[in-house]
Image (spheres, rainbow, N blue to C red):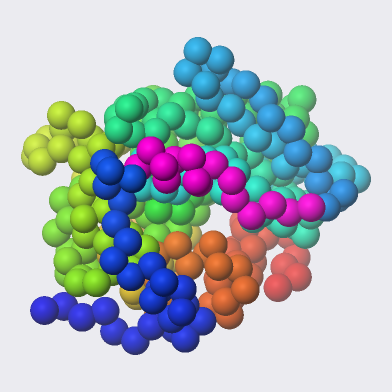
């Protein structure tokens, strides 16, 4: 049996409380409601506004704009996590608001439709529409399109990676970077970490349900496209600088490490950070020491990309 290994003490109590939790068809509707509110960041240093990108599909972009910062600013288009089946743009409020206030970066988060009611390619189409909207309105929004990238955690990381591949396929402006935190990118569940017993937060059954919901009729087929599961991409050349992080107590550990390795082998400048004892979604627990360290390392990488002096 593949074992979990030692859990960081900062997460032990939380993981005990979540022991045995699984996302399924029985509880996904309730979870979709419950994950419509994330930790808020209250500050007068940031202006937050919502913009309807596509009223027919319900695609909304939320902007977090730093007050009093002059000139076109770098921008992160963040795609929330939730296994493709839950979550909302509210989950991005805290980290985008913090980066707007502390780094002076503009944050954009997208509300995309969720599986199983909207399977692939619907959610990706929504995210691509948001990315196009941000680029087309960059001047009016005070955004530097040359420093506009995509980011996401879990399913959000999977959608961010797929969006980058889709932008390359469609010969539109590539994201300036991609920030992939514990990305959900491989539907084949073929790695050792994906078979770990007793995974907290996002176990094997939840992962199977998430992929089955997202892929619909494609699930289990050998011809799943790279835009649905980015780990299936054969050619990774020409993609933008990438940052990948993941914890060791995470079913996505091995696929994240493998993807980062393949990116580097393809000539893509890629940083990989693996955090011992950290579970899936550890970034949401901002008070944990490893979460604070991970946030500092992401901030420093973003500032280096923008040629800004890091305060980390």
56 vs 311: above or below: above
Residue 115, percent from left and from top: 33, 34
261 vs 70: above or below: below
Residue lying farthest to the top in this orientation? 56
Of residues 142 and 10, the one nearer the viewer is 10
61 vs 27: above or below: above
Residue 118 is drawn in which quadrant? top left
Of residues 4 and 295, the one nearer the viewer is 4
Residue 90, percent from left and from top: 60, 43
Count all numbered tags in the image, as a single digit.
0
Left or right: residue 231 compared with residue 301: left
Q: Quadrant of the C terminus?
A: bottom right
User: In this view of the protein, can residue 204 be seen by the observer?
Assistant: yes
Of residues 117 and 281, the one nearer the viewer is 117
User: Image point 46% across, 53% down: which residue?
Assistant: 153
User: Image point 57% across, 76% down: which residue?
Assistant: 288
The magenta-colored residue range is: 28-42
User: Image point 69% across, 37% down: which residue?
Assistant: 63
Residue 100, percent from left and from top: 74, 51
User: In this view of the protein, can residue 252 be seen by the observer?
Assistant: no
Residue 19, percent from left and from top: 33, 70
Left or right: residue 82 compared with residue 74: left
Residue lying farthest to the right in this orientation? 68
Residue 136 is drawn in which quadrant? top right
185 vs 260: above or below: above
Residue 192 is covered by the magenta coloring: no
Left or right: residue 283 compared with residue 118: right
Residue 253 is drawn in which quadrant? bottom left
Q: Quadrant of the N terminus?
A: bottom left
Of residues 98 and 89, the one nearer the viewer is 89
User: Image point 21% across, 55% down: which residue?
Assistant: 205
């Amino acid at each position: 049996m593949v074992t979990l290994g030692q859990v960081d003490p900062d997460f032990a109590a939380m993981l005990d409380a979540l022991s045995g939790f699984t996302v399924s068809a029985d509880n996904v509707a309730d979870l979709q409601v419950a994950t419509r509110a994330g930790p808020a960041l209250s500050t007068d240093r940031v202006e937050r506004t919502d913009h309807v990108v596509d009223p027919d599909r319900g695609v909304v972009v939320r902007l977090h704009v730093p007050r009093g910062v002059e000139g076109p600013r770098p921008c992160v288009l963040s795609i929330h996590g939730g296994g493709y089946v839950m979550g909302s743009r509210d989950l991005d409020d805290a980290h985008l608001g913090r980066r707007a206030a502390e780094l002076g970066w503009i944050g954009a988060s997208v509300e995309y439709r969720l599986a199983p009611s909207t399977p692939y390619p619907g959610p990706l189409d929504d995210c691509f529409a948001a990315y196009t909207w941000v680029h087309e309105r960059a001047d009016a929004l005070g955004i530097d399109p040359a420093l506009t990238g995509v980011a996401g955690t879990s399913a959000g990381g999977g959608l961010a990676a797929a969006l980058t591949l889709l932008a390359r396929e469609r010969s539109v402006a590539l994201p300036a970077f991609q920030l992939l935190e514990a990305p959900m990118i491989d539907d084949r569940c073929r790695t050792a970490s994906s078979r770990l017993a007793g995974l907290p937060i996002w176990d094997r059954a939840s992962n199977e349900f998430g992929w089955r919901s997202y892929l619909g009729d494609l699930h289990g087929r050998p011809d799943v496209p790279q835009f649905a599961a980015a780990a299936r991409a054969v050619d990774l050349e020409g993609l933008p600088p990438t940052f990948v992080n993941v914890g060791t107590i995470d079913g996505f550990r091995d696929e994240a490490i493998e993807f980062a390795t393949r990116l580097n082998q393809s000539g893509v400048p890629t940083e990989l950070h693996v955090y011992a004892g950290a579970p899936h979604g550890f970034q949401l627990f901002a008070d944990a020491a490893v979460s604070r360290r991970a946030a500092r390392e992401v901030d420093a990488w973003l500032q280096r990309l923008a040629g800004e002096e890091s305060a980390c």
